[in-house]
Amino acid sequence: MINFKNVYKYYKKDWVALNNLNLSIEKGQFNYLIGRSGAGKSTLMKMIYMEIFPTEGEVEVAGFSTKTIKQNEIPLLRRKIGVIFQDFKLLKDRNVYDNVAFALQVTGERHSSIRKKTLEALASVKMSHKRNSFPYQLSGGEQQKVAIARAIIKEPLILLADEPTGNVDPEGTKDILELLFEINTRGTAILMATHDYSLIKKSVGKVIGLRDGKSVNPEDIFKMEYGGGQ
């Protein structure tokens, strides 16, 4: 599903964001991505949806390669990928329904299909009752549920979650994780970046560790940066 092959990314001559990175994520896997700020997590995720490209090496995602993909094929790749951000990135001037529907409106899908899929997505995250509310009227956890509905409405093969519980209270965090696990059981591969070791400790999933742009044993990160072993 996702392969990084000898990937380097240089932003400046003396700043190597990814350093000979090799890793693979299989179809339907649940993966955690851990590492301190500056470890390369955001760069890795942006390469998956090809917002940025390697300086050296190759990234393969859902049958597309950074070496051969054409500019007009990038939107096709991104239809296979859902993305959830820490700060939600909801449209403040649109209600919940319109925020979720927007993900399909930009693809030119028929109105009747958009309505059906939007209502189904909101029901799947238990936010149907808030469909006429605006983001400012929602808690952090509720906003993140809307963001998840928007990310899954296209039925993606891959879901990227960048610190999805970073701005959510403990109860909301529990709800978000349960939703992600449920989505994963339907066959969607999930890559979740997090600083919260307690989430990983309580869950089942493959853990990918990054330090200075290199893939490292997650146990080393737990011991050196999180204060203990797994």
Image (spheres, rainbow, N blue to C red):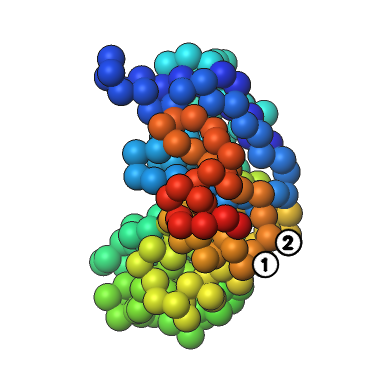
Tell me if mark 1 has few (under 14), some (14-19) or many (20+) residues whose alpha carbon lies within 10 angstroms of its own: few
Q: Residue furthest bottom?
A: 129
- Image quarter hosting the C terminus: bottom right
Vertical position of residue 140 compared to residue 53: above or below? below
Is 57 left or right of 203, judged from the image as shown? left
Is 38 left or right of 201, judged from the image as shown? left
Give the image location of residue 87, x and y in percent.
33, 60
In percent of the image, x 44 and y 30: which residue is there?
213
Q: Nearer the viewer, residue 204 or 111?
A: 204
Vertical position of residue 12 compared to residue 33: above or below? above
The kind of residue on which mark 2 rests is: Thr
**What whole-number distance in Å separates the C-alpha atoms at marks 1 and 2?**
5 Å
Q: Nearer the viewer, residue 176 or 135?
A: 176
Question: Could you say which disc has been placed on residue 182 in the image?
Answer: 1
Residue 209 visible (yes or no): yes
Vertical position of residue 218 compared to residue 154: above or below? above
In percent of the image, x 46 and y 23: which residue is there?
19
Give the image location of residue 77, x and y in percent.
56, 35
Q: Nearer the viewer, residue 227 or 17?
A: 227
Element on which disc 1 rests: helix
Give the image location of residue 61, x and y in percent.
61, 32
In percent of the image, x 62 and y 31: which residue is there?
23
Q: Nearer the viewer, residue 133 or 40?
A: 40
The kind of residue on which mark 1 rests is: Glu
